[in-house]
Structures are given as structure tokens and as C-alpha cells.
Image (cartoon, rainbow, N blue to C red):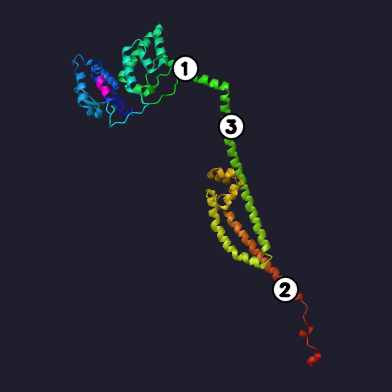
Amino acid sequence: MLDIKVTQGSYWSGSQIPYWLYMVFTIFPITGLLGIDHLLLRSPITALLKVLSIVPLFGFWYFYDIAQASGERELLEKYGLAIPFYGPLGIGAGIFNGSETTPAPPDSPRPWRYMLYAITTYISIFFPLNKIVLGDYVGAGAHLLMYILFPLTFLAIIWSFYDIYRVTLDTEGIFDKGPSRFFPATWFLNSNFDRSVLGPKPQEPSSGVFSTLGRVVNLATDATLGTGEIAVKGVQGVVKTTFDDAEDVVDTGAAVANNVVKTAGNVAEGVAKSVEKGAEATEKVVGLLDKLPGIADKIATDLPNKIAQQSQGKVLGSPVGQAISGTTDVVKSAPLASITKVVGQAGGAFGEPSISTAALLFSVGILAFSGYVFYTLRNTLRNDREKSDEPPRDSGATRVPSEATG
């Protein structure tokens, strides 16, 4: 019932009330005896109790507040007001402006409007003056119309007493949700008025029938002016462009993968031709065989790492990455993870090393070794043929005349 935290400066993000002004409200008989000084602190229950205690306690609470306001300023600023026969409750702690407090933000609602709203709610039961104080002119008109229309007059009176109930017993609810409206006005209006008028929370979007109709009218106006069509076309263009870009990325990634596969085939074919040509010259074949183990080791060591790095998107700075990025800007600007995924689906050109790598190396070795064997056999047969068909260089060197022997 007693919402103490809404009276404190921490709830409003700083102090709001000059202490001298509070003392004026406390000492002045009308405001002091009627509890308006407590309404200034947003404490309606203690304000009501203070009024009800005037006669039975002979105004004791009034003099009690004057004594603590004038003689215990530091305690009031730090710990808040105390209640007679009970003690401190923390009412208004930190709400008074001082050297040790930080002022509340400028857009934070001040206590004056709540004080006037509470006073008008108590005194204007048959006229919605409290709603005019808040600026709720639509709600005030609806409330007044309900008074005029005889079948709804009883509901209008209930609405007035319901406002008194909320001001007194649901202070925090007013600040959090806003001043309430009543049936049947809620058919056309929001159930609560703007909560930022009295409380620190921002305004909520409207949801009443009038607000809905207003939004429909605005949409119809926009459509008439063509803005609705432009917005739809703009959205369609964005969606189309997005899907077109995605399709370009996929197509480009597939093309790159196919080019890599073709390039790999060309490399294999070139290696085979090189080996075949190298077989025609002994020194080239021997040099190739001498270098082949080192090349094979180098390929077996570096190729899996390069392929793995490229699949992870880490070789864009390498010659291969520069060649690919030079082929298309889309691939370079696209996310590397997406390119890797697309290329992997396009044929596994950038996938992890498989058995085909070892088979390629083994085939190169077989070709080189076969060329070397073929070349050796051919030279051996040629030498044998040349030896068998070669005529004697000097017939006298092989046969000695009989005259000379005899």
C-alpha cells in the first residue's frame, strides 16, 4: 500500500525538490494540515493519514513534521521523513536537492503535476478535471460524455472513485502504467493514459480503436501518395538483389572450382608430356629422376597444408589466392566460409587431400621410370645393331697375307 520507493530520489534518478520549498509546504497551515507536503513527496497514504489525524491528535502530526523539517535537515535529506509513534520510513530520501545529491534528468517528470493530479482527483468527483491537468483531453471528453449519457452515468461515477483508489493505493502502478481509463471508454481508447506524464518510463505505443484507425488512415494516405508502393518495390528490390548476389556467389564459386579442376587436369597432362619428352634425353630423365624424390616429398609435405589452408580461407595472400581474387571480385568479397562450403559442394576441389594425390604422384613416378627404361632399352638395342652391321675398318688388320706368314 505504501509505495515508499516512488518517493525517493533513486527511483527518479536524482533529486527533484528544493528543501526550502518543502519547508514552506510543511510550515504553511493549509498545505501542512491538509497533507499537501506529503503529496509533494508523492506519498498519498501518509497525506491522507495526516489529514485524518488532525482532530483526534489535535494536529500533532503537523507540528511533528515542522520539528523534523527545521531541526533534522541532514537526517531528512539522507534517510527521509519519519512518522509519529513509528519512526523513519525513508519517505523522500534523496529527493531533496543538495550538495551531496545529483539532480534528476531534465525529462524526468516533476512532482508538481502529480500533486495537482492527486488534489483534483480528490475534489472533482463529478467532473474530470484531473484528466485535463494531465492533458488527457480525449479521456476527459469520454468521461464527461459518460456523465451526460444517462445509462452510463453510474459507470462514470465508478470511474471517478476508481481514480481515487489508484491515486491512494496504487501510486507505483500509476507511474508504471499510467492513469487508467474505464469501461466502456476502453473500447475506443487505451486502457491507460501516457505513463511518461507522471512516471519515469517512456510512453507506450497506442493500441485503442482511434489510434488503430489513425494508423490505417496514415497507411491509406501513404498508399495514395505512392509511398506504399515505393516501399514495397524497395523491399522487393532488396530481396531480389540479395538473392541475385547469393546466386552470383554460388555460380562464381562453382566456376572457380571447375577452373581449378580443369587446371589440375592440365597440370597432370603437362607433367605427362614433360616426362615423355624428357625420356628422349638421358640427362633430362636422369635430372628428373634425381629431383623427383625431393619434388614428391615437397608436394606430399606442402600440398595438404596448402589445401587445408585454402579450405580455411587463409591463403588469399598467396599466388593462388591472388589469382582467384583477380578472377572475380565477388569471390573475394564473399565470406570465406561460404566460398569454402560452395566450392566443396562443387566437386571438392578445395577439399582435404585424398587418395587421388598419392595416385597422381605414383603415376608421375611410373611414367618417369617407364620413360627411363624405354630410353635405356632403345639405346642398348641401337648400340647392338650398330656393332653387328659395322664393316671392318681395315681388312689387313684382321687377315695376314700368306706370303708374309710363310
Label 1 close to label 3 by CB (< 8 Å): no
Q: Please give the range of residues in magenta.
A: 20-25
Q: CA distance from mark 2 to mark 1?
A: 113 Å
Which residue is at the front of the view, 129 or 393? Answer: 129
- Which quadrant holds residue 53? top left
In front of the other: label 2 or label 1? 1
Give the mark nearest the N terminus, 2 or 1.
1
Mark 3: few/some/many CA within 10 Å (<14, 14-19, 20+): few
Identity of the residue drawn at 28% across and 25% down: 18
Where does label 3 land, which residue?
Answer: 237
Identity of the residue drawn at 64% across and 50% down: 262
Where does label 1 land, which residue?
Answer: 210
Q: Is residue 376 found inside the magenta-colored segment of the image?
A: no
Give the mark nearest the N terminus, 1 or 3.
1
Identity of the residue drawn at 39% across and 12% down: 143
Amino acid type, mark 2: Asp
Q: CA distance from mark 1 to mark 3?
A: 34 Å
Query: In the picture provided, is 160 more to the left or to the right than 22?
Result: right
Evaluate whether residue 250 shows in this view: yes
Q: CA distance from mark 3 to mark 2?
A: 81 Å
Mark 1: few/some/many CA within 10 Å (<14, 14-19, 20+): some
Amino acid type, mark 1: Phe
Which residue is at the front of the view, 179 or 15? Answer: 15
What x and y, as percent, mark residue 343? 58, 46
Query: Judging from the image, what secondary structure is the residue with disc 2 in?
Result: helix
What x and y, as percent, mark residue 217? 52, 19
What x and y, as percent, mark residue 223? 56, 22
Give the position of the N terminus as an image quadrant: top left
